[in-house]
Structure formats: C-alpha cells, structure tokens
C-alpha cells in the first residue's frame, strides 16, 4: 500500500476523524483528552490485571445530559490502582480535565456516546464511540494489547522473550512475516536478516524507546557491524549489543536453495559476538557491556530440493527442530558473564497434518 | 552567544509539552518534534524559509537542527534547562519565559504547529512517532544516503506536497485543527512502512 492509499484508509478506518465529524472541534478536543487519560491510566495499571472492561469518556454536548454527572467527586489518582486486581473501570473526564470514577448502572456505552466521546476496551478489542458511530482502534503494533499501553520491560532480556512469543513464533509481526518465501513458512527468502533486524528494532523501540536508544547496525570493526545496539538513557555507562543470525534454508525467487544454515552457522555467530564484546571492552573500557545472541530458527526436516508453489510438509518434519537445542563449543555464555544464554527463537511453519 | 529566537521558542514549547507527558525529555526529542512542527507548518502552506532555521537528516533517519542544538546548549548553560542523568527538565525560569514568548503574535502560528506535533504522543508512543516519521519522504531519502543531508530543500518537497494534498482531500478540508492531519499522517506513514515490508 502506498502512502496516499494509506492516508485514505486511515481516514476511513480510524477514530480520529470520527470524533471531529460527529462533534466538530469539541469532539477532537475530547478524543485527545480521552487518549491522554487512557495512556495515563495504562502507565499505572497493567492492562493484564484488568479482567473486565475499561470505559473512559468525555462529555462533549450536555444537551441530553446522559452520563454527565456533576463534578462533586474527587478526581481519581491512577497510582492508587497500581497493585489492585481490577474487574471493571469507568471514568468520566470532568470539566477540570481530571478523571472521575463513575458507576453507570444500567446506562449503556452507546447511550453515553450520544453526547460524548467514549473509549471502550474489553480483551483485545479497543474502540471509540461518538454519537451513533463507532470505530475500532487501528492496531498499528500487532503484539500489544492496547495501542495506548507501552509495556515497559525491566530488562532487554524480558523484551527478547516477548519478541519470541509475540512476533517470531507465529510470524505475527508484519515486518517479520516478510522473511518467508512461501505462505507455509518453510523456506526463507534469500538474505532475510535485514527484515529480522528491522522487526526486532521496531519491537524494541516501541517498548523500550522511551527509556532506551535502539540503534541499528553499529560498526564494531571495519568488517562486521553488530546488528543492534541498545543504550539506556538513564545509565549512560551501560551498553547492550544484539547479534542476530538465522538457521534454516533460504531460496531465491525462482525457488532454488541459496543457503542451508545449520548448527555451525549458529556457532559462528556466537564466536563473532564474543569477539565484538572483546573489542567493545577495549574501545569503551568504562562501559558495562552485555551481549545478547538471537538465533532465528527456521530449520525444517525433509524439505524438498526446491521451493515449488504450494509445497507443504508433515507436522513431524516441520516441528522436528522445535525443541532441539544447539550445542555450542566453545560456549561463551557458559564461560563469560557478559554473554547472555543464546535466545533461540523457533519460527513455526504451517504444516499439512 | 546570541540565542536564535525561533529555535529557542521551539525548544521551550516542545520541552513543556513533553515534560507534561513524561516528566523529562531528551535533546533528540526536541529535534524530532520541532521537525514535525516544521512539516505541519508546510502543510499550512507556509514556506520553509519562514520557519526560520533548517534541518538535516542523519544516516539513522532522524532530523537534526544546528539551531536547535545551539539553543539547547544555551538554555542549559543559562539555567533554563537542568540535566537529570541523560534527560532534561525545565526550570521555573523557562516556564516564565515561555509564557512571555507565547503571548507574542509572531509565535502564534508556529505554536499551533508545535502543539499539534506534540499532541501526537497522546495517540502513539514516542518510539512509534520516531518510526513513523522516519518514513516521511525527506527523512526516508536521508536514511538511504551515507551522509547527512539538508532536508526540505525546494526540489525535494514535491512528494511531501502530494501526501499533504491527499491528507487535505481525504479529510474534506473539514478542520483547520492541525492535530487531525498530524495523527492521520503519522498513522499512515507507520502503516505504509509495515505494509511495504510485506511486499514480495
């Protein structure tokens, strides 16, 4: 989709123009206030802790006075909700711009929306309502539960584990999906590493971007750049470097195999990262450096010699390598503290049976 | 050193908006939102010359302005900003000065652009704004070149204006509020990036 088509699609599908269309300038003010409030709420309350629904609204027109209670209540301090197990949450943004807890009784969100911009979230569905219109929130990042919630991971380690589960396992990430030659995810395209790197960079920036600089391809020596460098902004003597390698079979556009990488390739990457870490220690001796090695595992057993259209394999072959660990020798993660245990991420195929 | 008036005002205004959202801000964020403000200025059919200072695109696809950088250093040196670890905070002196500058008629239009730029963080994380903006035609071109280059030169603006026209026509020219085109455009840039990567 080119950018002009994308603009048209966003105008048709997103909630921003809807609020303006229904309530004019006041609707636009309201939707920005609601988004800011929802962001603030999710900064304090983990969405995973909410078992029911979240409703946040701002009354725009008080002509019918539905859902607009007087501001006699005290505004809610979201921080006080942080460690609670919550079922449902409902807040009205008052005239003071602050959130006030509301109990709606039998009033529905559709009734409130007659005079208000309403945000509603239940499970993985987020939507906005205004007047008699409703739009689901565009899910720009496929792996977050809310567009307004930026999960903050304590460590890069945890982020990488989420990357494996959320993006790699089922090739959920739009960018990562581009690495495959075929719809059944058996063969990789030739040279898929840049897409793997871009997918991980985007994932890390979306999650760690507020507190970390996530930088692609940093030169460590004149030959081989390290794939990603992550620097926390608040601790400027810390440096995390990520090396990515893939194993599996890649093919050219005509289906002939261009590379067949197995354990020796994984070993190569481990040795390379260990060398990077040594060089970094020399060039930046005051930094505390940690290395992270990501291996995208796309190995399949009994693949045909070429990738023909519609080719498929049995489940036993597709998942043969799923639990098969790689034996490293030498194994830098067992001998040096600055080398994390490698993150082998199995990217699963779609199999015939 | 003499402070560049436009760059100084922009630093103060963007800083206040970012600080209101996240307690502190960084230098690169000032460059980023000043640049987005400048793009919205062009969307409003003002000329890039009237913005008052220029930007270059770095190899990493980020905008950088020498004038913003100098203003930032001066504001730090004169006690308008404080450094807290690697992040920055405004002082009361900066708040008072911004209040005075904001009342000047000459700053009205640029404040509108900068406020709309900063409002986008209600809809997206900072990381997403960075990712989306790096797909904007000028920064996207800069990323493909091995060295920093001047952004928004006359000859290079045509692609940008095609996108702005698409924004205007799809929004039916229905509002002069810049927050709407800003968030729609950023969403579209972000989506076009991810769908481009899906193409065979």
Image (spheres, coloured by chain):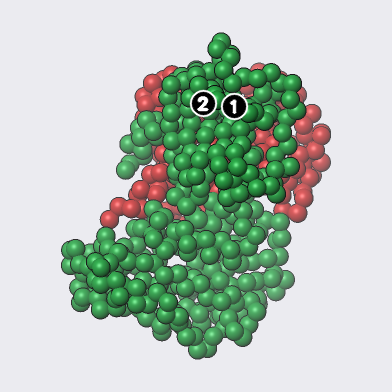
Chain colours: A green, B red
Percent coordinates x, y for residue A69 in the rendering:
65, 20
Residue B47 visible to the viewer: no
Relative horizontal placement of residue A294, taking residue A304 as reference (left or right):
right
Residue situated in front as seen by the camera: A68 or A79: A68
- Image mark 2: chain: A
Q: Is residue B40 above or below residue B87?
A: above
The circle on residue B20 is: none
Q: Is residue A125 above or below residue B170?
A: below
The residue positioned 36% from the left and 58% from the top of the image is: A177
Percent coordinates x, y for residue A245 in the rendering:
44, 72
The residue positioned 39% from the left and 53% from the top of the image is: A174
**Element type where label 2 sits in the image:** loop
Residue situated in front as seen by the camera: B14 or A1: A1
Which quarter of the rendering shows the N terminus of chain B?
Answer: top right
The residue positioned 39% from the left and 30% from the top of the image is: A11
- Image mark 1: chain: A
Q: Residues within 10 Å of mark 2 (few under 14, many from 20)?
A: few
The circle on residue A108 is: 2
Label 2–label 1 contact, CB within 8 A: yes
Q: How far, Cα to Cα, is label 2 from label 1?
A: 7 Å
Which quarter of the rendering shows the C terminus of chain B?
Answer: bottom left
Percent coordinates x, y for residue B37 in the rendering:
56, 33
The residue positioned 38% from the left and 21% from the top of the image is: B172
Percent coordinates x, y for residue B84 in the rendering:
77, 50
Q: Which residue is mark 1?
A: A104
């Amino acid at each position: 989709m080119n950018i002009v088509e994308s603009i048209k699609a966003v105008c048709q599908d997103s909630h921003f123009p809807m609020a303006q269309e229904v309530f004019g300038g006041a609707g636009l003010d309201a939707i920005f206030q609601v988004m800011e409030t929802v962001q603030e709420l999710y900064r304090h309350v983990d969405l995973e802790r909410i078992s029911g629904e979240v409703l946040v609204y701002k009354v725009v027109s008080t002509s019918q006075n539905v859902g607009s209670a007087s501001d006699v209540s005290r505004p809610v301090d979201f921080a006080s909700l942080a460690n609670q197990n919550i079922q449902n949450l409902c807040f009205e943004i008052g005239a003071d711009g602050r959130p006030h807890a509301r109990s709606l009784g039998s009033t529905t969100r559709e009734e409130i929306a007659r005079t208000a911009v309403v945000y509603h979230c239940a499970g993985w569905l987020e939507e906005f309502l205004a007047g008699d219109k409703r739009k689901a929130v565009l899910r720009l990042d496929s792996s977050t539960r809310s567009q307004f919630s930026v999960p903050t991971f304590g460590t890069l380690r945890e982020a990488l584990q989420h990357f494996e589960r959320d993006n790699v396992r089922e090739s959920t990430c739009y960018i990562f999906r581009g690495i495959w030659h075929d719809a059944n995810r058996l063969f990789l395209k030739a040279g898929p590493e840049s897409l793997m790197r871009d997918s991980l960079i985007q994932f890390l920036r979306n999650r760690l971007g507020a507190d970390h600089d996530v930088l692609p391809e940093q030169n460590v020596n004149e030959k081989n750049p390290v794939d990603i460098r992550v620097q926390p902004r608040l601790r400027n003597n810390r440096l995390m470097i990520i090396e990515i390698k893939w194993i599996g079979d890649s093919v050219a556009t005509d289906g002939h195999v261009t590379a067949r990488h197995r354990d020796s390739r994984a070993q190569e990457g481990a040795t390379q990262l260990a060398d990077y870490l040594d060089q970094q220690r020399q060039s930046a001796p005051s930094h505390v450096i940690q290395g992270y090695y990501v291996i995208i595992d796309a190995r399949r057993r009994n693949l045909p010699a070429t990738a023909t259209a519609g080719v498929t394999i049995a489940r036993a072959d597709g998942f043969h390598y799923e639990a098969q660990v790689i034996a490293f020798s030498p194994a830098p993660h067992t001998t040096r503290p600055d080398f994390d245990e490698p993150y082998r991420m199995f990217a699963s195929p779609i199999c015939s049976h | 050193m003499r402070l560049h008036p436009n760059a100084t005002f922009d630093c103060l205004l963007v800083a206040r908006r970012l600080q209101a959202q996240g307690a502190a801000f960084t230098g690169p964020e000032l460059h980023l939102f000043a640049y987005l403000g400048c793009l919205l200025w062009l969307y409003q059919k003002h000329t890039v010359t009237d913005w008052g200072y220029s930007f270059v695109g770095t190899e990493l696809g980020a905008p950088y302005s020498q004038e913003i950088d100098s203003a930032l250093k001066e504001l730090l040196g004169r006690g308008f900003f404080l450094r807290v670890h690697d992040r920055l905070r405004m002082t009361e002196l900066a708040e008072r000065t911004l209040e005075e500058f904001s009342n000047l008629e000459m700053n009205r239009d640029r404040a509108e652009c900068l406020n709309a730029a900063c409002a986008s963080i209600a809809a997206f994380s900072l990381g997403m704004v960075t990712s989306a903006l790096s797909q904007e035609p000028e920064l996207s071109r800069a990323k493909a070149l091995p060295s920093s280059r001047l952004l928004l030169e006359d000859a290079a603006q045509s692609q940008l204006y095609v996108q702005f026209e698409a924004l205007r026509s799809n929004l039916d020219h229905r509002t002069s509020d810049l927050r709407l085109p800003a968030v729609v455009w950023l969403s579209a840039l972000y989506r076009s990036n991810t769908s481009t990567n899906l193409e065979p």
